Image: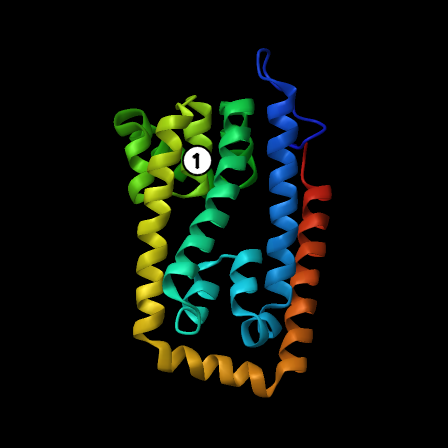
Amino acid sequence: MLSSDRAIVPAGIPARLVRASWGLLGVLTVASLVGTAFAPLLLVKAPLLLVVLAPDGRHLALVAGRVDPWLLMGVTVFRRTLYSVGVYGLGAAYGDLAVNWIEQRARSLGKALRTLERVFARVGAVLLLALPFLSVCVLAGAARTRVRVFLPTLVVGHSLWVSTTIWLGTRFAAQTQAVVDFFAERLLETTVVCVVLVAGYQLLSRRRQRNAPP
């Protein structure tokens, strides 16, 4: 299993980079879980904080009509970039080992990664402009793409996706407000249900990981 304490880091990779990448991803993952678990409450009471914790597209679209778009874009792009940088660091540290591990755990995703890997080998970091996804960030790290190339293309790619999502959320603000009103009227119930679902999913995922072959 690829983890912070089991995976073998290739020689020449600074241990500080590995620890920083795992630490950053750990903190942001916990933040995302907390944000998702308490999404109904945060959506109604603190929409910007919801995006800071869990900048998922669905959250972004729901809060787009209630937060200043420029502020929302800046916060979301920064938050997503932080996580992407952590994934990039792990890609640089573990290289093809990370892709192999993903391929073994999720074959369909692994095949998609191999396809992206071939595309990335042809076009390089430009792929991040269209697909600033975590899988591409892993490939960029594994290919040792220069940070001064990786970061600008990543930020532009995230900006394009985030601005499009904000535009759609603003365009359909009346419809998304109906969702917000639904949660507001049932705030306690929906928050409890969301917390239980997130906690249950995490427990199920951990059980599957324990039972998975090494």
Which amino acid is tagged 1? Cys
Query: What residue appears at the point 46 percent right and 37 percent down from the top-left corner?
Result: 110
Residue 186 vertical placement versus 67 (above, below): below
Q: In the image, 185: left or right of 143?
A: right
How many residues crowd mark 1 within 10 Å: few (<14), some (14–19), many (20+)?
many
Query: What residue appears at the point 38 percent right and 27 percent down from the top-left corner?
Result: 148
Residue 94 vertical placement versus 157 (above, below): above
Residue 207 vertical placement versus 153 (above, below): below
Residue found farthest to the top: 11
Q: Quadrant of residue 68?
A: bottom left
Q: Which residue is mark 1?
A: 137
Residue 183 in percent (x, y) is at: 56, 81
State the scheme by which the image is colored.
Answer: rainbow
Q: Quadrant of residue 22?
A: top right
Residue 30 in percent (x, y) is at: 66, 51
Query: What residue appears at the point 41 percent right and 43 percent down from the top-left corner?
Result: 133
Total label count?
Answer: 1
Residue 73 vertical placement versus 146 (above, below): below
Q: In the image, 154: left or right of 134?
A: left
Residue 126 in percent (x, y) is at: 28, 34
Q: Quadrant of residue 168?
A: bottom left
Question: Image quadrant for the N terminus?
Answer: top right
Question: Image quadrant for the C terminus?
Answer: top right
- Label 1: which secondary element: helix
Which one is in front, 210 or 97?
Answer: 97
